[in-house]
Amino acid sequence: MDRLTSAARLMIVSDLDHTMVDHHDTENLSLLRFNALWEANYRDNSLLVFSTGRSPTLYKELRKEKPMLTPDITIMSVGTEITYGNSMVPDDGWETFLNNKWDRKIVTEETCKFPELTLQAESEQRPHKVSFSVQKEKAEDIMKTLSKRLEERGLDVKIIYSGGMDLDILPQGAGKGQALAYLLKKLKSEGKLPHNTLACGDSGNDAELFSIPDVYGVMVANAQEELLQWHAANAKNNPKVIHASERCAAGIIQAIGHFNLGPSTSPRDVMDLSDCKMDNFVPAYEVVKFYLFFEKWRRGEIEHSEHYLANLKAVCRPSGTFVHPSGVEKSLQECVTLFRTCHGDKQGKQYRIWVDQVLPAQVGSDSWLVSFKKWELSGEDRRCCITTVLLSSKGKTLADGLTWTHVHQTWLHGSAPSDSTAWLV
């Protein structure tokens, strides 16, 4: 959160499975659409928060499987763990708060008396969360009985049933909603309360998110019955909570537009990126736009045209240089010339590009240094390089776009291939 010196323009707090991530979308298109929108328009002045029931172990596994962005804040284990930044630094104050009237040993003793409860994997058992699987028809009775027994033993707990099978026992002060309330209070104390907050979810353990005052909410189109029932009983007349007509991340984009929270057209939905009209120079948008063009070029989704190549050469400074992750240096003009050889070489194949953590810094009156991670997925092969780009507006109009003067890339640790010649830009 220290990245921002003032209040975030928008804070999105989203569940992952079946909300941000659509496990039925094999191409991950809705997620990639959100990624492009966020990096082009929001990353540098907003906050992205992932709020998931997954443990840190399963969360990291999902990040390896899906083209997910890096959040500023991660809330895990159904709101019992809050971490910050790339290094996922834990919030010690939150952990201390959750210790009140919580004894994991007592919870374990009492739950052992219910044979209907099946303990989930060891990775899902956390300091402030004990998780089970239970049949849907037995869940309600078990929750009532168990809650009473734990109260009799001096504990103040919360039992959450979600997904039609998952039963989580947490401290009463825990949960996705309380974790969000804690974050908002913390940001307010620092003078950084977001101008707008949008909560996004699909299941029962997301219901609390929509109960926080002054927070917009979206239940994605594929929301589960338990959440829809909660909404009908508790928030039916709340205009700040909607049930989207679009699935997963597409529903989040829909909500941004519905509530007028900012730009809601993903660059991936723009047919001709060269026609984009901007009110001022936006370096992040230029980066997203370039790599979307490169993906479409290699997938053969745009025609092999000298017009496109001429436009690319026009935005590359004649003396501009590109430092390949292997260390080889060549001119940017030479890189554009190489584009002729790769048009459509990924046609019909699983090939996607996305950029993450696009952060521009103005280093002169007409120049910006933009740093980001550039990811490339080709079949099962997934690579990433840390990229720095120097962009200039000198002598350019908004219609011209920014000039690329220098590009430098290095492999992300563990991402370098044995043969790096196939990596172009």
Image (cartoon, rainbow, N blue to C red):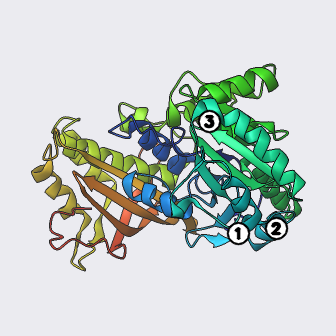
User: Mark 2 and 1 residues: CB-CB less than 8 Å, in contact?
Assistant: no
Q: Which mark is residue 99?
A: 2
Which structural element holds mark 3? loop
Residue flagged by tag 1: what amino acid is it?
Answer: Asp
- Circle 1 packing at 10 Å, graded few (<14), some (14-19), many (20+), is few
Residue flagged by tag 3: what amino acid is it?
Answer: Ser
Quote the CA–CA distance across marks 1 and 3. Answer: 31 Å
Which one is closest to the eye, mark 2 or mark 1?
2
- Residue 77 shows in the view: yes
Q: Earlier in the sequence, mark 2 or mark 1?
A: 1
Q: Which residue is mark 1?
A: 2
Camera-side residue: 1 or 160? Answer: 160
Q: Residue 105: horizontal and vertical position, in percent? A: 73, 67
The residue at 60%/62% (across/down) is 125
Left or right: where does residue 390 sit relative to residue 407?
right
Quadrant into which the C terminus falls: bottom left
Which structural element holds mark 2? loop
Q: Is residue 28 above or below residue 364?
A: above
Q: Earlier in the sequence, mark 3 or mark 2?
A: 2
Q: Residue 335: horizontal and vertical position, in percent? A: 20, 61
Residue with the most extreme left position: 341
Q: Is residue 167 above or below residue 216?
A: below
Q: Residue 254: horizontal and vertical position, in percent? A: 58, 29
Residue flagged by tag 2: what amino acid is it?
Answer: Asn
Q: Residue 201: horizontal and vertical position, in percent? A: 62, 37
Q: Earlier in the sequence, mark 1 or mark 3?
A: 1
- Circle 2 packing at 10 Å, graded few (<14), some (14-19), many (20+), is some
Q: Which residue is mark 3?
A: 203
- Residue 192 shows in the view: no
Would you identify the image quadrant in which residue 208 lies? top right
Camera-side residue: 401 or 180? Answer: 180
